[in-house]
Amino acid sequence: MGMYLVINIIGLVIFLAIGFLFSKDRRAIQWKSIAIMVVLNLVLAWFLTSFGVGRAIVSGAAEGFNWLVQVAYVGIEFALPSWVHVKQMDFVTSALLPILLIVPLFDILTYIGVLPFIIKWIGKGLSFITGQPKFESFFAVEMMFLGNTEALAVSTLQLKQMKAQRNVTLAMMSMSCVTASIIGAYIQMMPGQFVLTAIPINIINAIIVTSLLNPVTVTPEEDTIAKLSGEGESGKKEPFFSFLGDSILGAGKLILIIAANVIAFVALAALIDKVLQLVNPWLTLEHILGIIMYPFAWLLGLNGHDSFQMAQYMGTKLVTNEFVVMGKVTGIVGKFDPHFKAVLTVFITSFANFSTLGMIIGCFKGIVDKEKNDTISKNVGYMLLSGILVSLLSAAFVGLFVW
């Protein structure tokens, strides 16, 4: 363990150094703020993985989401009993259909003002502790609850008013989130305690990485929050049941989008493998990606065999999405070494992949002007690098305390 712990620590330093190396303006990096956030994440990872109280909080949250999923199965069972009363439910039934309850629930909490209140005050607290601009801190928390495109959509007024460089920061941060409404699906497939530990750590790492890669000086006049919720310009809410109907339809579309993406990506990956194997039977997408990602996996403190396996999962996740990897390992993850289990779960608990790039760019195109869009499009490489670095850092932080 001793040697691998040292490698894990070195990996953490190297991942931060990569952010510095690729920084757009190294002289503008606020090192005091970075140091505060690194210490905050170390304490958070330590508390959530090594203390009885921290583990109890995470376990309680996981049980809460599991309870929600079990309630969702009541609705699924009413409509589709033959899909529920089986020895082993398939991926769509067990992981995706509960979204039909969880998304509307979070939307209702938004509608009545509970979620915006929580987001606002956590965001303010994060800004105060880290010294980062108010809106960037607010947006990081908002993404955790609402998701990337949803958070961007309800921040339309702010995005239009902000300078292009800050829009790039938000685009980079958008690569690193997960949506609270999908956590229920995640914890049906992966160890819930590590999924839920990853989420707050991802938030702070998203701010760390963007502060390194794209440091922006924000004046006190610019450091304001223009809009805190998705209410209409008139400030009037639409009728509740109309709102709820739209939310349920939106949840249904989300299920179809995830299912379509998983089916298409798995099939496309299989097709690429078949073509590659015409050249050499050993050649597969996983093997190629495994070689590319191997050094980064090794820096997470894994032995040679686990590093290669981890690297393949990392590459597959970046090219496809987290659900594809979860589907591959859900039946065997319980047998993994505790450290491997922790770093793998934390790494894949994010939306950082190629398809997310398209979603974010498309979302910005519908919100900001052509000049800001062009700036964001020129930073696609930075967006992808940001997502990968956040996932690596989060896995490294949590890995330090799980062996």
Image: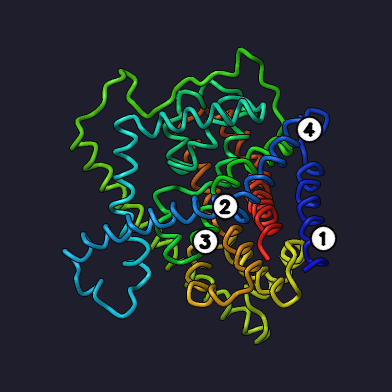
Q: Is residue 116 above or below residue 264?
A: above
Q: Mark 3 to mark 2: distance in Å?
A: 14 Å
Q: Specify which label sits upstream in the sequence, 3 or 2.
A: 2
In depth, the one of 402 and 18 nearer the eye is 402
Q: Distance between the residues labelled 3 and 4?
A: 32 Å
Q: Give the structural element (helix, strand or loop) at label 4.
A: helix
Q: Which of marks 1 and 4 is nearer the N terminus?
A: 1
Labels 3, 2: front one: 2
Image quadrant holding the C terminus, namely: bottom right
Measure the alpha-carbon separation of dots 2 and 4.
24 Å
Q: Distance between the residues labelled 1 and 4?
A: 24 Å
Tag 1 residue: 6
Task: Provide residue 267's location: percent of width, then percent of height.
Answer: 47, 72
Which residue extends farthest front?
52
Q: Nearer the viewer, mark 1 or mark 3?
A: 1
The residue that label 4 is drawn on is 31
Residue 135 location, quadrant:
top right
Q: Where is residue 228 in the image (x, y as percent from the top left)?
A: 43, 25
Q: Which mark's residue is nearer the viewer, 3 or 4?
A: 4
Disc 3 designates what residue?
Answer: 322
Q: Alpha-carbon distance for marks 1 and 2?
A: 21 Å
Three-letter amino acid code at the position of disc 4: Trp
Q: Which residue is drawn at 56% across and 54% down?
A: 52
Q: Which of marks 3 and 4 is nearer the N terminus?
A: 4
